[in-house]
Image: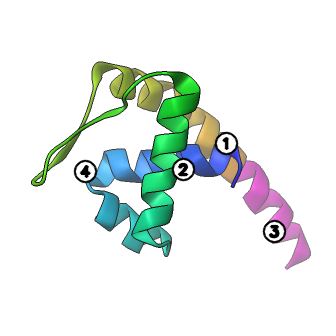
């Protein structure tokens, strides 16, 4: 799994407020989503979510990261779509 994949996973967890919801939306095992977030937090050296048994909320660093990566991930997805469309 590359960095962009981890950012996509992070965005889904942030937007859905749920690791389980993100896993379902992405068609991934919950453990994969959890591991991706843990790896991202470790590589950035910060916590991105406040987690409780009832909810998952972004930390201040998580909010800042989400603001910066949304356009990056959108650009990557647009680029990938252009090449997929050419093959069709």
For label 3, the SS is helix
How far apart in space, not on screen, are marks 1 and 4 (Cα)? 20 Å
| Residue 46 visible in this rendered orientation of the protein | yes
Tell me which corner region of the image, top left, top right, bottom left or bottom right, holds residue 62.
Answer: top left
Name the spot of residue 13 as percent of width and height, x first.
36, 51
How far apart in space, not on screen, are marks 2 and 4 (Cα)? 14 Å
Question: Looking at the rendering, in which quadrant would you find the N terminus?
Answer: bottom right
How far apart in space, not on screen, are marks 2 and 3 (Cα)? 18 Å
Question: Looking at the rendering, in which quadrant would you find the C terminus?
Answer: bottom right
Question: Contact (CB < 8 A) between labels 2 and 4?
Answer: no
Q: Residue at x 34, y 44 (%)?
A: 14
Q: Which residues are magenta?
A: 78-88
Vertical position of residue 13 compared to residue 50: above or below = below
Q: Which mark is residue 8?
A: 2
Residue bearing the label numbered 4: 17
Tell me which corner region of the image, top left, top right, bottom left or bottom right, holds residue 83.
Answer: bottom right
Q: If you read the primary sequence from the N terminus, does the residue marked by circle 1 or circle 4 appear first?
A: 1
Residue bearing the label numbered 1: 3
Name the spot of residue 27 as percent of width and height, x first.
49, 75
Q: If you read the primary sequence from the N terminus, does the residue marked by circle 2 or circle 1 appear first?
A: 1
**Which of the pair 5/30 is nearer the observer?**
30
Question: Contact (CB < 8 A) between labels 2 and 3?
Answer: no
For label 1, the SS is helix
Can residue 68 be found in the magenta stretch? no
């Amino acid at each position: 799994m590359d960095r962009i994949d981890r950012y996509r996973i992070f965005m889904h967890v942030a937007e859905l407020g749920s690791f389980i919801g993100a896993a379902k939306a992405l068609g991934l095992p919950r453990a994969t989503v959890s591991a991706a977030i843990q790896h991202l937090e470790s590589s950035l050296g910060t916590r991105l979510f406040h987690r409780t048994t009832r909810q998952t909320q972004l930390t201040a660093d998580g909010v800042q990261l989400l603001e910066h990566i949304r356009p990056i991930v959108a650009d990557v997805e647009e680029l990938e779509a252009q090449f997929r469309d050419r093959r069709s």
